[in-house]
Amino acid sequence: MKDTLKIQNHEIYISDTSVRTLASECSTPLYIYDLPALKQRMAEFKDHFVSNTLKTHVIYASKAFSCLAMNQLVSQFGFSLDVVSGGELYTALQSNFDLSRVYFHGNNKSDDELNMAIELGVGTIVVDNLMEAKRLVRFCENPKHKIHVLLRVNPGIEAHTHKYIQTAFIDSKFGISTLNTDEIKAVIDTIQTNSNLQFDGFHAHIGSQIFELDAFKAEIEKICQFVQEFQNQTQIQVRTLDFGGGFGVRYTDEDQPVEIALVCKTIVSEAEKQIAAYELSVEEICIEPGRSIIAEAGYQLYTIGDLKQTPNRNYIFVDGGMTDNIRPVLYQADYDFDIATNADAPKTKTVCIAGKCCESGDLLAENTLVQPYQTNDLLLVSSTGAYGYSMASNYNKLAIPSVVFVDHGKIIPIIKRQTYQDLIQRENLIDQDLFSL
Ligand code: LLP
Protein backbone atom coordinates (compact mmCIF):
# COMPACT_ATOMS: atom_id res chain seq x y z
CA MET A 1 0.00 0.00 0.00
CA LYS A 2 1.21 3.52 -0.77
CA ASP A 3 2.70 5.54 2.05
CA THR A 4 0.39 8.47 1.24
CA LEU A 5 -2.57 6.30 2.33
CA LYS A 6 -3.56 5.98 6.00
CA ILE A 7 -5.45 3.21 7.79
CA GLN A 8 -7.81 3.86 10.70
CA ASN A 9 -10.30 1.30 12.09
CA HIS A 10 -9.21 -1.12 9.33
CA GLU A 11 -10.25 1.39 6.71
CA ILE A 12 -8.19 3.26 4.12
CA TYR A 13 -8.14 7.07 4.11
CA ILE A 14 -7.10 9.01 1.01
CA SER A 15 -6.14 12.57 1.91
CA ASP A 16 -7.97 12.19 5.23
CA THR A 17 -11.13 10.91 3.54
CA SER A 18 -12.38 7.45 4.44
CA VAL A 19 -13.29 5.03 1.67
CA ARG A 20 -16.66 4.32 3.34
CA THR A 21 -17.49 8.02 3.26
CA LEU A 22 -16.47 8.17 -0.39
CA ALA A 23 -18.60 5.13 -1.22
CA SER A 24 -21.63 6.35 0.67
CA GLU A 25 -21.49 9.94 -0.62
CA CYS A 26 -20.43 9.25 -4.19
CA SER A 27 -21.32 5.54 -4.65
CA THR A 28 -19.13 3.06 -6.49
CA PRO A 29 -17.47 2.46 -8.86
CA LEU A 30 -15.64 5.72 -8.35
CA TYR A 31 -12.52 7.45 -9.68
CA ILE A 32 -10.68 9.32 -6.92
CA TYR A 33 -7.73 11.71 -7.18
CA ASP A 34 -5.65 12.66 -4.15
CA LEU A 35 -5.37 16.39 -4.88
CA PRO A 36 -2.44 17.20 -2.54
CA ALA A 37 -0.45 14.28 -4.03
CA LEU A 38 -1.27 15.43 -7.55
CA LYS A 39 -0.22 19.00 -6.76
CA GLN A 40 2.98 17.77 -5.21
CA ARG A 41 3.85 15.81 -8.35
CA MET A 42 3.13 18.81 -10.54
CA ALA A 43 5.31 20.99 -8.30
CA GLU A 44 8.18 18.52 -8.77
CA PHE A 45 7.99 18.99 -12.54
CA LYS A 46 7.72 22.75 -12.17
CA ASP A 47 10.67 22.99 -9.79
CA HIS A 48 13.02 20.62 -11.57
CA PHE A 49 12.42 21.05 -15.27
CA VAL A 50 14.37 24.32 -15.30
CA SER A 51 17.56 25.47 -16.96
CA ASN A 52 19.86 28.48 -16.71
CA THR A 53 20.48 28.61 -20.43
CA LEU A 54 17.29 27.34 -22.09
CA LYS A 55 13.60 28.15 -21.82
CA THR A 56 11.72 25.11 -20.50
CA HIS A 57 8.08 24.08 -20.89
CA VAL A 58 6.16 21.27 -19.25
CA ILE A 59 3.28 20.30 -21.54
CA TYR A 60 0.68 18.08 -19.84
CA ALA A 61 -0.44 15.28 -22.20
CA SER A 62 -4.16 15.59 -21.58
CA LYS A 63 -4.95 12.21 -23.18
CA ALA A 64 -3.94 10.66 -19.83
CA PHE A 65 -6.89 12.39 -18.12
CA SER A 66 -8.72 15.25 -19.75
CA CYS A 67 -11.49 17.23 -18.10
CA LEU A 68 -12.30 20.82 -17.21
CA ALA A 69 -11.02 20.69 -13.63
CA MET A 70 -7.75 19.00 -14.60
CA ASN A 71 -7.13 21.62 -17.28
CA GLN A 72 -7.75 24.33 -14.68
CA LEU A 73 -5.13 22.77 -12.43
CA VAL A 74 -2.66 22.50 -15.32
CA SER A 75 -3.21 26.17 -16.08
CA GLN A 76 -2.73 27.08 -12.42
CA PHE A 77 0.73 25.48 -12.52
CA GLY A 78 1.62 27.42 -15.67
CA PHE A 79 2.02 24.28 -17.76
CA SER A 80 1.07 24.02 -21.41
CA LEU A 81 -1.42 21.46 -22.75
CA ASP A 82 -1.06 18.69 -25.35
CA VAL A 83 -4.32 17.86 -27.13
CA VAL A 84 -4.81 15.28 -29.87
CA SER A 85 -8.36 15.85 -31.05
CA GLY A 86 -11.08 18.42 -31.52
CA GLY A 87 -12.67 17.00 -28.36
CA GLU A 88 -9.60 17.57 -26.19
CA LEU A 89 -9.23 21.02 -27.75
CA TYR A 90 -12.87 21.84 -27.02
CA THR A 91 -12.32 20.74 -23.41
CA ALA A 92 -9.34 23.13 -23.21
CA LEU A 93 -11.49 25.94 -24.61
CA GLN A 94 -14.32 25.31 -22.16
CA SER A 95 -11.91 25.26 -19.24
CA ASN A 96 -10.73 28.76 -20.25
CA PHE A 97 -7.25 27.42 -20.89
CA ASP A 98 -5.00 29.95 -22.63
CA LEU A 99 -5.09 28.40 -26.11
CA SER A 100 -1.81 30.00 -27.12
CA ARG A 101 -0.31 27.42 -24.71
CA VAL A 102 -1.96 24.47 -26.46
CA TYR A 103 0.04 22.03 -28.61
CA PHE A 104 -2.16 20.21 -31.11
CA HIS A 105 -0.82 16.71 -31.88
CA GLY A 106 -2.16 13.77 -33.86
CA ASN A 107 -1.35 11.77 -36.97
CA ASN A 108 -4.60 12.40 -38.83
CA LYS A 109 -6.11 15.70 -37.79
CA SER A 110 -9.23 16.26 -39.86
CA ASP A 111 -9.82 19.41 -41.93
CA ASP A 112 -12.39 20.46 -39.34
CA GLU A 113 -9.97 19.95 -36.48
CA LEU A 114 -7.22 21.95 -38.21
CA ASN A 115 -9.63 24.78 -39.00
CA MET A 116 -10.95 24.73 -35.45
CA ALA A 117 -7.39 25.01 -34.11
CA ILE A 118 -6.61 27.90 -36.46
CA GLU A 119 -9.84 29.76 -35.66
CA LEU A 120 -9.38 29.37 -31.93
CA GLY A 121 -5.80 30.59 -32.09
CA VAL A 122 -4.05 27.44 -30.88
CA GLY A 123 -0.39 28.30 -30.16
CA THR A 124 1.41 25.35 -31.71
CA ILE A 125 0.45 22.68 -34.21
CA VAL A 126 2.62 19.58 -34.23
CA VAL A 127 2.59 18.46 -37.85
CA ASP A 128 2.85 14.74 -38.51
CA ASN A 129 3.40 14.46 -42.27
CA LEU A 130 3.65 16.26 -45.61
CA MET A 131 -0.01 15.94 -46.54
CA GLU A 132 -0.99 17.54 -43.28
CA ALA A 133 1.53 20.36 -43.80
CA LYS A 134 -0.05 21.11 -47.19
CA ARG A 135 -3.55 21.21 -45.73
CA LEU A 136 -2.39 23.45 -42.89
CA VAL A 137 -0.80 25.90 -45.33
CA ARG A 138 -4.04 26.03 -47.36
CA PHE A 139 -6.27 26.63 -44.36
CA CYS A 140 -4.07 29.09 -42.52
CA GLU A 141 -5.08 32.25 -44.39
CA ASN A 142 -6.17 34.51 -41.64
CA PRO A 143 -5.26 33.15 -38.22
CA LYS A 144 -5.78 35.14 -35.00
CA HIS A 145 -2.04 34.99 -34.30
CA LYS A 146 0.96 33.51 -35.99
CA ILE A 147 0.83 29.74 -35.45
CA HIS A 148 3.96 27.98 -34.33
CA VAL A 149 4.74 24.63 -35.95
CA LEU A 150 6.75 21.69 -34.72
CA LEU A 151 7.33 18.64 -36.89
CA ARG A 152 7.08 15.21 -35.31
CA VAL A 153 10.13 13.13 -36.17
CA ASN A 154 10.86 9.54 -35.38
CA PRO A 155 14.44 9.11 -34.12
CA GLY A 156 14.11 5.30 -34.20
CA ILE A 157 14.94 4.79 -30.54
CA GLU A 158 13.47 1.60 -29.12
CA ALA A 159 12.37 2.08 -25.55
CA HIS A 160 11.84 -0.99 -23.36
CA THR A 161 8.14 -0.96 -22.98
CA HIS A 162 5.03 -2.86 -23.99
CA LYS A 163 4.99 -3.24 -27.75
CA TYR A 164 1.50 -1.80 -28.13
CA ILE A 165 2.60 1.47 -26.63
CA GLN A 166 5.89 1.81 -28.42
CA THR A 167 5.86 4.65 -30.91
CA ALA A 168 9.31 5.24 -32.30
CA PHE A 169 10.15 2.08 -34.23
CA ILE A 170 10.97 2.59 -37.88
CA ASP A 171 7.50 1.76 -39.21
CA SER A 172 5.66 3.85 -36.66
CA LYS A 173 2.51 5.58 -37.85
CA PHE A 174 3.75 8.70 -36.06
CA GLY A 175 5.99 11.37 -37.55
CA ILE A 176 8.72 11.13 -40.19
CA SER A 177 11.91 9.15 -39.70
CA THR A 178 14.99 11.30 -39.06
CA LEU A 179 16.61 9.24 -41.85
CA ASN A 180 14.16 10.75 -44.32
CA THR A 181 15.65 14.25 -44.51
CA ASP A 182 14.16 14.98 -47.96
CA GLU A 183 10.63 14.62 -46.66
CA ILE A 184 11.43 16.58 -43.52
CA LYS A 185 12.85 19.37 -45.70
CA ALA A 186 9.75 19.26 -47.92
CA VAL A 187 7.47 19.68 -44.89
CA ILE A 188 9.43 22.68 -43.60
CA ASP A 189 9.62 24.29 -47.07
CA THR A 190 5.86 23.87 -47.32
CA ILE A 191 5.29 25.46 -43.90
CA GLN A 192 7.58 28.34 -44.79
CA THR A 193 5.51 29.26 -47.86
CA ASN A 194 2.88 30.65 -45.47
CA SER A 195 3.98 33.67 -43.45
CA ASN A 196 1.24 33.00 -40.88
CA LEU A 197 3.09 29.87 -39.86
CA GLN A 198 6.38 29.80 -38.01
CA PHE A 199 8.48 26.65 -38.07
CA ASP A 200 10.08 26.31 -34.61
CA GLY A 201 11.58 22.85 -34.48
CA PHE A 202 11.07 19.17 -33.85
CA HIS A 203 9.07 16.91 -31.59
CA ALA A 204 9.64 13.24 -30.76
CA HIS A 205 8.07 10.79 -28.32
CA ILE A 206 9.83 7.46 -27.89
CA GLY A 207 7.26 5.43 -25.97
CA SER A 208 5.51 5.04 -22.67
CA GLN A 209 6.18 3.73 -19.17
CA ILE A 210 9.96 3.95 -19.75
CA PHE A 211 12.24 3.40 -16.77
CA GLU A 212 15.70 3.77 -18.30
CA LEU A 213 17.05 7.30 -18.27
CA ASP A 214 19.48 6.12 -20.94
CA ALA A 215 16.60 5.87 -23.41
CA PHE A 216 15.89 9.60 -23.00
CA LYS A 217 19.58 10.45 -23.16
CA ALA A 218 19.87 8.44 -26.38
CA GLU A 219 16.83 10.24 -27.78
CA ILE A 220 18.28 13.68 -26.96
CA GLU A 221 21.68 12.88 -28.40
CA LYS A 222 20.19 11.39 -31.57
CA ILE A 223 17.89 14.35 -32.15
CA CYS A 224 20.64 16.90 -31.54
CA GLN A 225 22.94 15.07 -33.92
CA PHE A 226 20.17 14.97 -36.52
CA VAL A 227 19.47 18.72 -36.06
CA GLN A 228 23.12 19.59 -36.59
CA GLU A 229 23.32 17.61 -39.84
CA PHE A 230 19.99 19.01 -40.96
CA GLN A 231 20.97 22.60 -40.18
CA ASN A 232 24.24 22.20 -42.03
CA GLN A 233 22.46 20.81 -45.08
CA THR A 234 19.52 23.20 -45.20
CA GLN A 235 20.42 26.33 -43.17
CA ILE A 236 16.98 25.94 -41.53
CA GLN A 237 17.13 27.29 -37.98
CA VAL A 238 15.72 25.18 -35.15
CA ARG A 239 14.78 26.98 -31.93
CA THR A 240 12.60 24.38 -30.13
CA LEU A 241 13.01 20.72 -29.26
CA ASP A 242 10.18 18.78 -27.64
CA PHE A 243 11.26 15.39 -26.29
CA GLY A 244 7.76 14.04 -25.53
CA GLY A 245 6.67 12.12 -22.45
CA GLY A 246 6.74 8.48 -21.42
CA PHE A 247 8.29 8.62 -17.93
CA GLY A 248 7.57 5.44 -16.00
CA VAL A 249 5.41 5.27 -12.86
CA ARG A 250 4.89 2.80 -10.03
CA TYR A 251 1.89 0.55 -10.53
CA THR A 252 3.14 -2.27 -8.27
CA ASP A 253 6.27 -2.98 -6.22
CA GLU A 254 7.82 -4.51 -9.35
CA ASP A 255 8.05 -1.03 -10.85
CA GLN A 256 10.98 1.05 -9.71
CA PRO A 257 10.63 4.39 -11.47
CA VAL A 258 13.34 7.02 -11.33
CA GLU A 259 12.35 10.02 -9.18
CA ILE A 260 10.75 12.75 -11.28
CA ALA A 261 13.23 15.34 -10.03
CA LEU A 262 16.06 13.21 -11.42
CA VAL A 263 14.24 12.57 -14.71
CA CYS A 264 13.76 16.31 -15.19
CA LYS A 265 17.31 17.22 -14.18
CA THR A 266 18.78 14.53 -16.44
CA ILE A 267 16.80 15.67 -19.46
CA VAL A 268 17.71 19.30 -18.89
CA SER A 269 21.41 18.64 -18.35
CA GLU A 270 21.64 16.22 -21.28
CA ALA A 271 19.87 18.72 -23.55
CA GLU A 272 22.12 21.58 -22.39
CA LYS A 273 25.17 19.40 -23.00
CA GLN A 274 24.17 18.14 -26.45
CA ILE A 275 22.86 21.50 -27.67
CA ALA A 276 26.22 23.05 -26.75
CA ALA A 277 28.25 20.14 -28.15
CA TYR A 278 26.46 20.23 -31.50
CA GLU A 279 26.44 24.06 -31.50
CA LEU A 280 22.70 24.28 -32.12
CA SER A 281 20.60 27.43 -32.17
CA VAL A 282 17.99 25.78 -29.92
CA GLU A 283 16.60 28.14 -27.24
CA GLU A 284 13.73 26.14 -25.80
CA ILE A 285 13.09 22.56 -24.69
CA CYS A 286 9.81 20.86 -23.80
CA ILE A 287 8.61 17.61 -22.24
CA GLU A 288 5.11 16.13 -22.40
CA PRO A 289 4.38 14.03 -19.33
CA GLY A 290 0.91 12.51 -19.07
CA ARG A 291 1.01 9.32 -17.00
CA SER A 292 3.81 10.51 -14.69
CA ILE A 293 1.73 13.53 -13.66
CA ILE A 294 -1.61 11.88 -13.07
CA ALA A 295 -1.27 8.09 -12.60
CA GLU A 296 -0.10 7.72 -9.02
CA ALA A 297 -2.52 10.29 -7.57
CA GLY A 298 -5.47 8.28 -8.92
CA TYR A 299 -7.46 5.41 -7.36
CA GLN A 300 -10.51 3.39 -8.23
CA LEU A 301 -12.98 2.22 -5.63
CA TYR A 302 -15.35 -0.70 -6.17
CA THR A 303 -17.86 -2.54 -4.03
CA ILE A 304 -17.37 -6.28 -3.82
CA GLY A 305 -20.50 -8.11 -4.94
CA ASP A 306 -20.92 -11.83 -5.32
CA LEU A 307 -18.10 -14.31 -4.73
CA LYS A 308 -17.59 -17.51 -6.65
CA GLN A 309 -15.22 -20.45 -6.40
CA THR A 310 -14.25 -22.52 -9.42
CA PRO A 311 -11.76 -25.41 -9.32
CA ASN A 312 -8.82 -23.08 -9.82
CA ARG A 313 -10.05 -19.61 -8.96
CA ASN A 314 -11.48 -17.57 -6.11
CA TYR A 315 -13.50 -14.94 -7.93
CA ILE A 316 -14.27 -11.52 -6.50
CA PHE A 317 -16.89 -9.77 -8.62
CA VAL A 318 -16.84 -5.97 -8.59
CA ASP A 319 -19.39 -3.41 -9.74
CA GLY A 320 -17.28 -2.12 -12.67
CA GLY A 321 -14.50 -3.65 -14.76
CA MET A 322 -13.00 -3.27 -18.22
CA THR A 323 -15.39 -0.42 -19.02
CA ASP A 324 -13.78 1.83 -16.40
CA ASN A 325 -10.23 0.44 -16.68
CA ILE A 326 -9.37 -1.36 -19.91
CA ARG A 327 -5.63 -1.45 -19.19
CA PRO A 328 -5.42 -4.93 -17.54
CA VAL A 329 -7.22 -6.47 -20.52
CA LEU A 330 -5.53 -4.42 -23.23
CA TYR A 331 -1.95 -4.37 -21.93
CA GLN A 332 -1.97 -7.05 -19.20
CA ALA A 333 -1.28 -4.11 -16.87
CA ASP A 334 -0.80 -4.96 -13.18
CA TYR A 335 -2.06 -2.94 -10.24
CA ASP A 336 -2.00 -3.11 -6.44
CA PHE A 337 -5.35 -4.10 -4.90
CA ASP A 338 -6.45 -3.61 -1.29
CA ILE A 339 -9.56 -4.61 0.58
CA ALA A 340 -10.05 -1.03 1.67
CA THR A 341 -12.35 -1.94 4.57
CA ASN A 342 -9.94 -4.55 5.99
CA ALA A 343 -6.69 -2.93 4.98
CA ASP A 344 -4.52 -3.67 8.03
CA ALA A 345 -4.91 -7.45 7.71
CA PRO A 346 -2.10 -9.30 5.92
CA LYS A 347 -2.65 -10.12 2.25
CA THR A 348 -3.30 -13.86 2.48
CA LYS A 349 -5.92 -14.47 -0.22
CA THR A 350 -5.10 -15.18 -3.83
CA VAL A 351 -7.97 -14.00 -5.98
CA CYS A 352 -9.17 -13.34 -9.48
CA ILE A 353 -10.93 -9.98 -9.67
CA ALA A 354 -13.59 -9.90 -12.37
CA GLY A 355 -15.75 -7.12 -13.70
CA LYS A 356 -19.40 -7.37 -14.64
CA CYS A 357 -19.11 -7.21 -18.44
CA CYS A 358 -20.26 -9.99 -20.76
CA GLU A 359 -16.71 -10.85 -21.70
CA SER A 360 -14.67 -13.70 -20.20
CA GLY A 361 -11.56 -11.55 -20.40
CA ASP A 362 -13.08 -8.84 -18.23
CA LEU A 363 -10.61 -9.30 -15.38
CA LEU A 364 -8.92 -6.55 -13.39
CA ALA A 365 -6.46 -9.11 -12.02
CA GLU A 366 -6.09 -12.79 -12.79
CA ASN A 367 -4.05 -13.80 -9.84
CA THR A 368 -3.38 -11.27 -7.12
CA LEU A 369 -3.02 -11.17 -3.36
CA VAL A 370 -5.49 -9.27 -1.16
CA GLN A 371 -6.53 -9.11 2.50
CA PRO A 372 -9.43 -11.36 3.64
CA TYR A 373 -12.72 -10.02 2.30
CA GLN A 374 -16.45 -10.48 2.20
CA THR A 375 -19.34 -9.25 0.11
CA ASN A 376 -19.97 -5.50 0.45
CA ASP A 377 -16.36 -4.79 1.38
CA LEU A 378 -14.72 -2.04 -0.67
CA LEU A 379 -11.84 -2.75 -3.04
CA LEU A 380 -9.28 -0.03 -3.78
CA VAL A 381 -7.02 -0.10 -6.83
CA SER A 382 -3.99 2.21 -6.73
CA SER A 383 -2.23 4.22 -9.45
CA THR A 384 -5.17 4.17 -11.82
CA GLY A 385 -5.12 7.89 -12.56
CA ALA A 386 -3.79 7.71 -16.12
CA TYR A 387 -5.61 6.25 -19.10
CA GLY A 388 -8.38 4.80 -16.92
CA TYR A 389 -11.18 7.33 -17.11
CA SER A 390 -9.85 8.56 -20.46
CA MET A 391 -10.22 5.10 -22.04
CA ALA A 392 -13.53 4.25 -20.36
CA SER A 393 -16.34 2.89 -22.53
CA ASN A 394 -20.05 2.21 -22.36
CA TYR A 395 -19.81 -1.48 -23.29
CA ASN A 396 -22.90 -3.32 -22.03
CA LYS A 397 -24.35 0.16 -21.53
CA LEU A 398 -22.58 0.48 -18.22
CA ALA A 399 -22.51 4.10 -17.05
CA ILE A 400 -19.10 5.76 -16.75
CA PRO A 401 -18.45 6.41 -13.02
CA SER A 402 -18.03 9.82 -11.46
CA VAL A 403 -14.68 11.40 -10.65
CA VAL A 404 -13.81 13.28 -7.48
CA PHE A 405 -10.79 15.08 -6.07
CA VAL A 406 -10.20 14.59 -2.34
CA ASP A 407 -8.36 17.23 -0.40
CA HIS A 408 -7.78 16.85 3.36
CA GLY A 409 -11.21 15.39 4.06
CA LYS A 410 -13.06 17.44 1.46
CA ILE A 411 -14.68 15.69 -1.51
CA ILE A 412 -14.75 17.81 -4.66
CA PRO A 413 -16.91 16.37 -7.46
CA ILE A 414 -15.33 17.02 -10.86
CA ILE A 415 -17.22 14.69 -13.24
CA LYS A 416 -20.75 13.35 -12.71
CA ARG A 417 -21.62 9.70 -13.11
CA GLN A 418 -23.50 9.02 -16.35
CA THR A 419 -27.19 8.32 -15.92
CA TYR A 420 -29.27 5.80 -17.87
CA GLN A 421 -30.74 8.80 -19.68
CA ASP A 422 -27.21 9.88 -20.71
CA LEU A 423 -26.71 6.47 -22.25
CA ILE A 424 -29.51 6.93 -24.77
CA GLN A 425 -29.60 10.69 -25.17
CA ARG A 426 -28.09 10.65 -28.68
CA GLU A 427 -30.36 7.85 -29.90
CA ASN A 428 -33.54 8.30 -31.99
CA LEU A 429 -36.72 6.28 -31.86
CA ILE A 430 -37.77 5.89 -35.48
CA ASP A 431 -41.08 5.48 -37.25
CA GLN A 432 -42.22 1.87 -36.74
CA ASP A 433 -43.55 1.80 -40.34
CA LEU A 434 -39.98 1.75 -41.60
CA PHE A 435 -39.76 -1.85 -40.39
CA SER A 436 -42.81 -3.12 -42.31
CA LEU A 437 -41.95 -6.02 -44.58
N1 LLP B 1 3.29 12.98 -26.07
C1 LLP B 1 2.88 12.21 -27.09
C2 LLP B 1 3.07 12.68 -28.44
C3 LLP B 1 2.26 10.98 -26.84
O1 LLP B 1 1.88 10.23 -27.86
C4 LLP B 1 2.05 10.56 -25.51
C5 LLP B 1 1.38 9.29 -25.23
C6 LLP B 1 2.48 11.40 -24.47
C7 LLP B 1 3.11 12.61 -24.78
C8 LLP B 1 2.30 11.06 -23.01
O2 LLP B 1 2.92 9.86 -22.67
P1 LLP B 1 2.94 9.41 -21.11
O3 LLP B 1 3.82 10.39 -20.38
O4 LLP B 1 1.54 9.47 -20.63
O5 LLP B 1 3.46 8.02 -21.14
N2 LLP B 1 -3.02 4.16 -23.45
C9 LLP B 1 -1.66 3.78 -23.11
C10 LLP B 1 -0.71 4.92 -23.27
C11 LLP B 1 -0.69 5.51 -24.64
C12 LLP B 1 0.23 6.70 -24.72
C13 LLP B 1 0.08 7.41 -25.99
N3 LLP B 1 0.88 8.57 -26.12
C14 LLP B 1 -1.65 3.24 -21.69
O6 LLP B 1 -2.69 3.16 -21.04
O7 LLP B 1 -0.61 2.81 -21.19
Image: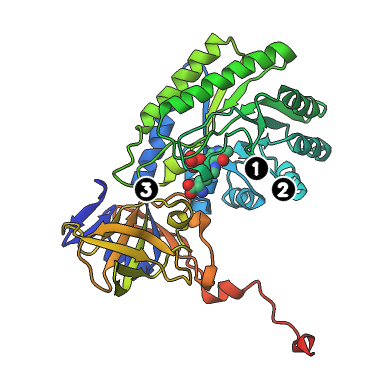
Q: CA distance from mark 1 to mark 3?
A: 27 Å
Can see residue 61? no
Dot 1 and dot 2 residues touching (CB under 8 Å):
yes
In front of the other: 359 or 238: 359
**Is 32 placed above or below 209 here?**
below
Q: Earlier in the sequence, mark 1 or mark 3?
A: 1
Kindly identify which residue carries mark 2.
Answer: 113
Tell me, for residue 106, which label it has, or none: 1
Residue at the spot x=45%, y=58% of the render? 325
In-image side of 46 versus 303 (left or right): right
Dot 2 and dot 3 residues touching (CB under 8 Å):
no
In-image side of 110 versus 373 (left or right): right
In-image side of 7 versus 14 (left or right): left
Task: Point out the frontmost of discs 1 and 3.
Answer: 1
Q: Earlier in the sequence, mark 2 or mark 3?
A: 2
User: Quadrant location of residue 114?
Assistant: top right
Q: What amino acid is at disc 2?
A: Glu
* Location of residue 156 in the rendering, given as x and y in whole percent from the top left corner: 58, 29
Kindly identify which residue carries mark 3.
Answer: 297
Within 8 Å: ligand 1 and the Cβ of disc 2?
A: no
Q: Which residue, as the protein is rendered here, is positioned at the far front?
A: 311
Q: Residues within 10 Å of mark 2 (few under 14, many from 20)?
A: some
Q: What amino acid is at disc 1?
A: Gly
